[in-house]
Image (spheres, rainbow, N blue to C red):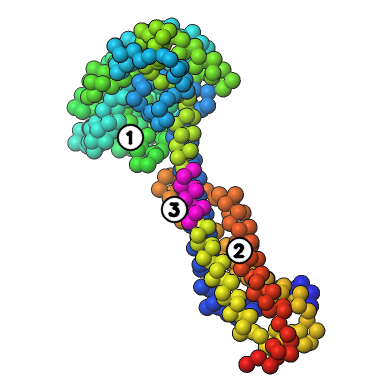
Amino acid sequence: MDYRDTLSLAFRTVRSNKLRTGITVAIIAFGIMALVGINTAIDAMKQKFTESFSAMGANGFTIHYRKWFNFNGGGVKAQKKGLREKKSNSSVPITRMQAETFLARYQFPSIASINYMGAQDAVVSLGSKKTNPNVRVVGGDEHYAELNGYSLATGRNLNSLDIQSGRNVCIIGSSLAEKFFGKNPATPVEKIIRVNNLPFRVIGVLEEKGSTFGMSYDNVIITSYNNVRRNFNTNPNASFNIQVKVADVKLIDGAIDQAEGVFRPVRRLDVQEADNFMIDKSDTFVALLLKNLSFITLSAGVIGFITLVGAAIGLMNIMLVAVTERTKEIGLVKAIGGRSRNVRQQFLWESVLISLLGAGFGVVLGVIVGNVFSLVLSTGFVVPWLWVIGGIFICSVVGLLAGWYPSVKASRLNPIEALRYE
């Protein structure tokens, strides 16, 4: 018997025992489905995080009040040992004066922008139509849209006069434009809408950006930070934020060093006092979130491992039962000239084929289940190729390990005793 005959015989045997094979394949498929499905969902989450939080790319950073986004207890700049906290303003948010002073003094070649968060539950209305109280109002300047990944579909951006005067002009998100004016993005420009019952003239419409975990980036009103401070300042402890983007990622460290040097005097810190603000790179948020996702990946691995161990034990038991049931067949194969090697290979091939069938079904189901989650996040179709290949390899190893002992046991049977077996 050559390898082709052995493989053909193994395949026919697997196909003839449909119930037994089906149960074992289902157990293996469940383990691989859990492994591939969870990691497909994680890849979708990583893709969404990267799209959502890295609008400025790796060549940008944000200066903000230290209580914001403090995931790891510190920003890019670690606190130097021996420095004391400045009690007089350690809990004082960044003011408009401080943010504007920083922009005036900061000379590093870059694009810098000030923003100020306003209401998160604003109501926008036009005539008898109005939105739910879930519209975000953001205050920025002429560079805010660019540094936060927005593009104008039509109309114009904020200008210096809009910012200095704080007049009631705004740029609206695509979902608001479509709700009130239809799908033509040019229609809303120069129209008057009401935001929390205050009249605003629309000067531009943003291109569609999508959403993350239920928060729509298109359900937004962008106006000047002075306007938000005057009309939508619902939080007395709200802080201004400063965003900076340099032309090349190689310049980022120098830009951060100079920003810290400029902002410390603005915050009235002397050389012995620690920073009372944070500087975070644009991709810091993504890195921290992806680091936390590694725990979910580990959990998926543990779930898949436990399931596959159970499947391996079940497969080995089934193969041992098959050896017992086919004792006469083994004796006949040896009696007509089959070698122990041929018998061993046949049972190994059967075990591996069952495992690979389970891997195939598990991979397909895992990718489908994982991409259901990606549809919720509005990301593209995701296939975790590394985990797919790894899952198939693991199943091959499981098949070999589970089938080794039964195959050795079968190959050592005495042909005469096997033929006499009842």
**Residue bearing the label numbered 3:** 372
Q: Is residue 193 left or right of residue 203?
A: left
Picture quarter with the N terminus: bottom right
Looking at the image, residue 222 sits to the left or right of residue 293; the answer is left
Give the spatial CA distance, label 2 vs label 3.
Answer: 29 Å
Q: Amino acid at mark 2?
A: Val
Q: Which residue is mark 2?
A: 398
Amino acid on which disc 3 is placed: Val
The residue at 30%/13% (across/down) is: 87
Residue occupying image coordinates x 74% and y 90%: 416
The quadrant where residue 225 appears: top left
Residue 55 on the magenta span: no
Q: Residues within 10 Å of mark 2 (few under 14, many from 20)?
A: many
Q: Amino acid at mark 1?
A: Asn
Identify which residue, 196 or 287, lies in the foreground.
287
Left or right: residue 46 versus residue 212 is right
Q: Nearer the viewer, residue 422 or 333?
A: 422
Quickly name the residue at label 1: 219
